[in-house]
């Protein structure tokens, strides 16, 4: 799961602390997802190179690539996480098997739909003031092979300020889940940021499907 945008006035020490906390939280949520998937799968986790065989471009849909984290080193099945940013929109992409061998491809799979419900529950649980604006449905354009859910949430660093809009994407390709979160502030620039989100999502879906 991604954390919303970091505060622009944070000190370097607090930034490092938040980065560590974000990594720990992502790892914990990824492990919980792994346990869920294994509980409905038939095979134990196996060593893979998932996510590492994707050529993650420096620029994708107008977003610039940030940190790439190899969670697979922590536990097989957790895969890889990649961050992308524009000036006001933050995206995190995760590619992982969850330990499932021969993961069915496509959003019609009960395994994919069940995992989507579980991830939605995590978003609602770990982000206060969150509600679902648009329930899970196939995405637009090249993202029609992904399920997409739209959320509204309170900014954890500014509860009284602008809220956040966040999109969750989930699909299965080449034996791995592909999950993305794209988040931005619900302010005067929300329409432009939503358009930027859509450009990134289409570029990401094209990359994954190519």
Image (cartoon, helix red, strand yellow):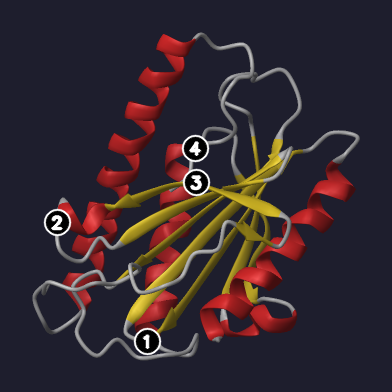
Q: Which is more N-terminal, label 4 or label 3?
A: 4
Instruction: Give the left or right position of residue 101, taking residue 105 as reference.
Output: left
Residue shown at the point (34%, 77%) measured from the top left: 176
Picture quarter with the C terminus: bottom right
- Mark 3–mark 1 Cα distance, whole angstroms, equals 29 Å
Q: Which is more N-terminal, label 4 or label 1?
A: 4
Q: Which is more N-terminal, label 2 or label 4?
A: 4
Question: Residue 15, labelled with which disc?
Answer: none
The correct choice, above or below, for 41 with respect to 63 in the image is below
In terms of secondary structure, where does tag 3 sit? helix
Asked if disc 2 and disc 1 are in contact, CB closer than 8 Å, the reply is: no
Q: Which of labels 3 and 2 is toward the front?
A: 2
Q: From the image, tell me which residue sits under label 2.
A: 75
Q: From the image, tell me which residue sits under label 4.
A: 3
- Mark 1–mark 4 Cα distance, whole angstroms, equals 27 Å
Residue 21 horizontal/vertical position (percent): 34, 28
Q: Which of labels 3 and 4 is toward the front?
A: 4
Instruction: Give the left or right position of residue 100, taking residue 22 as reference.
Output: left
Few, some or many residues within 10 Å of mark 3 (<14, 14–19, 20+): some
Q: Which is more N-terminal, label 1 or label 2?
A: 2
Q: From the image, tell me which residue sits under label 1.
A: 174
Residue shown at the point (60%, 32%) measured from the top left: 5
* Towards the viewer: 38 or 12: 12
């Amino acid at each position: 799961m991604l954390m919303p945008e970091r505060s622009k006035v944070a000190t370097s020490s607090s930034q490092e602390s938040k980065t560590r906390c974000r990594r720990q939280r992502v790892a914990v949520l990824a492990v919980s997802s792994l346990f869920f998937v294994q509980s409905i799968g038939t095979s134990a986790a196996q060593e893979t190179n998932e996510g590492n065989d994707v050529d993650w471009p420096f620029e994708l849909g107008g977003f610039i690539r940030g940190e790439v984290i190899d969670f697979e080193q922590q536990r097989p099945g957790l895969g890889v996480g990649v961050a992308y940013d524009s000036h006001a929109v933050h995206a995190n992409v995760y590619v992982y098997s969850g330990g499932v061998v021969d993961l069915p491809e496509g959003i019609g799979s009960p395994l994919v739909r069940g995992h989507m419900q579980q991830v939605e529950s995590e978003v609602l649980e770990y982000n206060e003031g969150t509600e679902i604006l648009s329930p899970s449905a196939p995405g637009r354009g090249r993202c029609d092979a992904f399920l997409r859910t739209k959320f509204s949430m309170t900014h954890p660093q500014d509860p009284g300020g602008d809220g956040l809009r966040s999109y969750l994407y989930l699909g299965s390709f080449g034996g791995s889940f592909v999950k993305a979160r794209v988040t931005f502030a619900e302010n005067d620039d929300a329409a432009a940021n939503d358009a930027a989100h859509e450009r990134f999502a289409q570029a990401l879906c094209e990359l994954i499907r190519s």
